[in-house]
Amino acid sequence: MSQPRATQVLVIGYVWPEPRSSAAGGHMMQILQTFLQQGWDITFSSPASDGEHPADLTALGIRQVPIELNNSSFDAFVSELAPDIVLFDRFMMEEQFGWRVEKHCPNALRVLETSDLQSLRDARQQRLKDRLKASDDTNDFNDLFAPALREEFQLMADTDVAKREIAAIYRCDLNLMVSEVEIELLVEQFQVPRSLLHWCPLMVDPPTEPPRTFEERAHFLHIGNFRHAPNWDAVLWLKTAIWPLIREQIPGAQLHIYGAYTPPKATALHNASQGFHVKNWAEDALEVMSAARICMAPLRFGAGIKGKIVDAMLCGTPVVTTPMGAEAMHDQEPWPGAVALTAQEFADCAVRLHDDKTSWNAAQDNGRALLVERYQQSVHGNALIKKIIESQQQLAQLRRDNFTGSMLRHHQHKSTQYMSQWIEVKNKVQ
């Protein structure tokens, strides 16, 4: 008697996952591991070129299949694979391949991994740019850190990216959201049905070994992929405003900055005499995080939740950040470090934690408790599988209830289809 076919999952990635380079890559790997634990058969495809630090998916039993944009070869590929579930990694992949999946695999559950709301991140970045143009004050950004949802909606509403991103959310049967704040923004301001959204934050196993102690650590640390605009801005704010204030209080203080894809403009900031060390990519991010006494995350804009902060909690490293960095990460739980509004406050909090063992130990304990409370892999992994199975079982009703999504698929997919087919023909005749 033949065995029943394993659930077939196709993941269409914006990039090949790099869990050691970005939180988005780490979250994708957590999702893939959750699927593997169910015995699901996974194929990962992407039109992207290889990155510098890709995960070895083949070693996990995941097939890797490159695909092309604007090429009908994908149609034959997806038809033959006949996936039960298609996961789009960020909305751009749904735009490119959603209509092809719907045409050739209409019964497949279409899931969007948003990573974070790019339109929200972009709008906040523009707000910061406008603020910097209007004022030379690089110390106080309190006015940027506590916007109401209505203000965020108004920032986003007129942008093309928001229209594209939220249309993709409507067109999918299920959308994975890392941030509860973004869920409320979509529901309350953009009127997205809550049934289309599922909270799926970073999923980790709390450490079983005790972390390094206060005495076993030294120095300040910042870590983050330099291709991610909020991280580069954070380094600039550290360099120009925050770090000089720390050095005034601790003249021998050292800051180690790590990040994948370090550009020349970042290495140019290296200055050993100022204790400002730009060290490029960390082979083992958790090791360098575990050796640091303080993690610095001075984010002036961004969206989603922050992988570097979850890593810091895993390593028992207290974190100093802004309200933007802490957004959606701790609910009502005590923060594992400090949240600061200005450069001076940021520096003062970092120095206090660096020097005060009692405060430092309390922050470390808060981080470990927060991991258990909000980020356990077993809790969120099980909830994700349950939600996917429920959505598959109710797929026909979900689509009937989502008329807006059906309407958007009808109009947007037609225009995308014709544009893609035109590009394909154009490429053939060149």
Image (cartoon, rainbow, N blue to C red):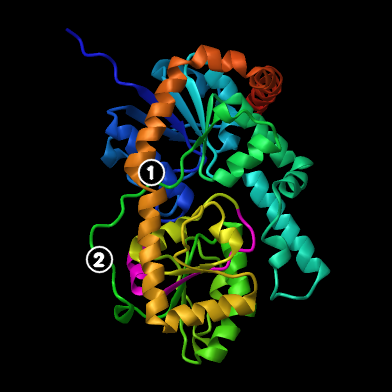
Q: Which residue is mark 2?
A: 210
Residue at image coords 40%, 75% = 360
> Image quarter for residue 127?
bottom right
Q: Would you say 273 lies left or right of 289 here?
A: right
Q: Nearer the viewer, residue 144 or 267?
A: 144
Residue 185, position in %: x, y?
65, 41
Residue 260, position in %: x, y?
47, 61
Q: Nearer the viewer, residue 203 or 72?
A: 203
Is disc 1 placed on a helix, strand or loop?
Answer: helix
Residue at image coords 36%, 37% = 381
Residue 15, position in %: x, y?
49, 43
Q: Which residue is mark 1?
A: 29
Looking at the rendered structure, the kind of residue marked 2 is Pro
Looking at the rendered structure, the kind of residue marked 1 is Met
Image quadrant containing the N terminus? top left
Q: Residue furthest top?
A: 1
Residue 17 in view = no
> Image quarter for residue 31?
top left
Q: Residue furthest front?
A: 332
Residue at image coords 30%, 39% = 58
Q: Would you say 226 lies left or right of 61 here?
A: right
Q: Would you say 155 lies left or right of 117 here?
A: right
Residue 178 in view = yes
Mark 1 or mark 2, which is nearer the start of the sequence?
A: 1
- Above/below status of 373 relative to 280: above
Q: Would you say 39 lies left or right of 356 here?
A: left
Which residues fall within the magenta stretch?
283-302
Q: Nearer the viewer, residue 81 or 388?
A: 388
Residue at image coords 28%, 72% = 212
Cβ atoms under marks 2 and 1 closer than 8 Å: no
What is the CA distance from the residue labelled 2 to the residue labelled 1? Answer: 25 Å
Q: Residue furthest right?
A: 134
